[in-house]
Image: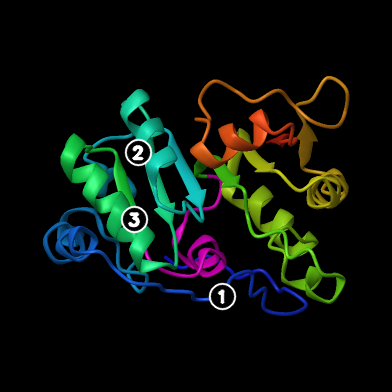
Amino acid sequence: MLTTEVSFPRKIQSFIRRQGRLTSGQQHALDNHWNVYGLDPSIDYDFSEIFGRNAPLCVEIGFGNGESLAQMAAANPAIDYIGIEVHRPGVGHLLMLAAEQNLTNVRIYCHDAIEILEKRLPDDGVSGVHLFFPDPWPKKKHHKRRIVQPGFTELLSRKLKLGGYFHAASDWQHYAKHMLAVLSQEQRLANASTSADYCPRPDYRPLTKFEQRGIRLGHGVWDLIFRKI
């Protein structure tokens, strides 16, 4: 059954399709492993049937090359993960990792995350949503492209289970402040920070190579975790 769509003031286009070049390994993974891990955005799935069990469902928006998502899935076999990414090279890379590690708790959409959240994920059915290092769209004229907007937080609060969480991380302080302000306005989401702002990085979020380099150079990273109440 389709869920009722959120009425966004405008369609959030938070990404540009920079497809880039597929490596031979990524193309091979798309050709040979998509039928195992790929999800069709036009189909309503029963995820308990897809994964063959009832388990907490965690969604990652924009998983990049998929290395962090693969690490989390391998480290947390009792959790089922859905990754959403529009860039095919990243999808191909995650397919390679999933097949190499024989991960059974990962499935992938290559599609617009907002549409998947609106139409394909169950209301009150998601245990966690991850948004790690989204495009900050730093120019003021592009701020409207940022994915974290009031319509997005309303959608989150509808999809999350009671007690479920949204976890965002950014290395752009201005965007982190923007997300904090927007998330704090959603009455059904409560900040998990004891200081009412940012949280320490949880152990379940792997450090990326880019992030490790930034830390060595003294760059900051801000984690926000909000729970549905």
Is residue 140 inside the magenta stretch? no
Query: Where 194 falls versus 23 (above or below)?
Result: above
Say which mark, if any, is on residue 108. 3
Query: Where 21 falls versus 80 (above or below)?
Result: below
Give the farthest residue toward the bottom. 10
Tell me the quadrant of the picture where the C terminus can be found: top right
**In front of the other: 191 or 204:** 204
- Marks 3 and 2: which is nearer the front? 2
Query: Where 150 falls versus 129 (above or below)?
Result: below
Relative side of 160 to 58, left or right: right
Relative side of 71 to 61, left or right: left
Contact? badges 1 and 3 (CB < 8 Å): no
Q: Which residues are magenta?
A: 108-124
Name the residue rendered at 75%, 35% in the picture.
Answer: 220
Describe the element under mark 2 as helix, strand or loop.
helix
> Residue 63 location in percent, x, y?
47, 51
For label 1, count other residues whose C-alpha is less than 10 Å away and answer few (under 14), some (14-19) or many (20+).
few
Residue type, label 1: Ile
Give the farthest residue toward the left. 32
First in sequence, mark 1 or 3: give its number. 1
Q: Which residue is mark 2?
A: 70
Residue type, label 3: Ile
First in sequence, mark 2 or 1: give its number. 1
Observer able to see residue 44:
no
Q: Which residue is mark 1?
A: 16
Observer able to see residue 38:
yes
Mark 3–mark 2 Cα distance, whole angstroms, equals: 11 Å
**In front of the other: 28 or 72:** 28
First in sequence, mark 3 or 2: give its number. 2
Name the residue rendered at 34%, 64% in the picture.
Answer: 89
The quarter of the picture where residue 173 lies is top right
> Residue 48 location in percent, x, y?
30, 43
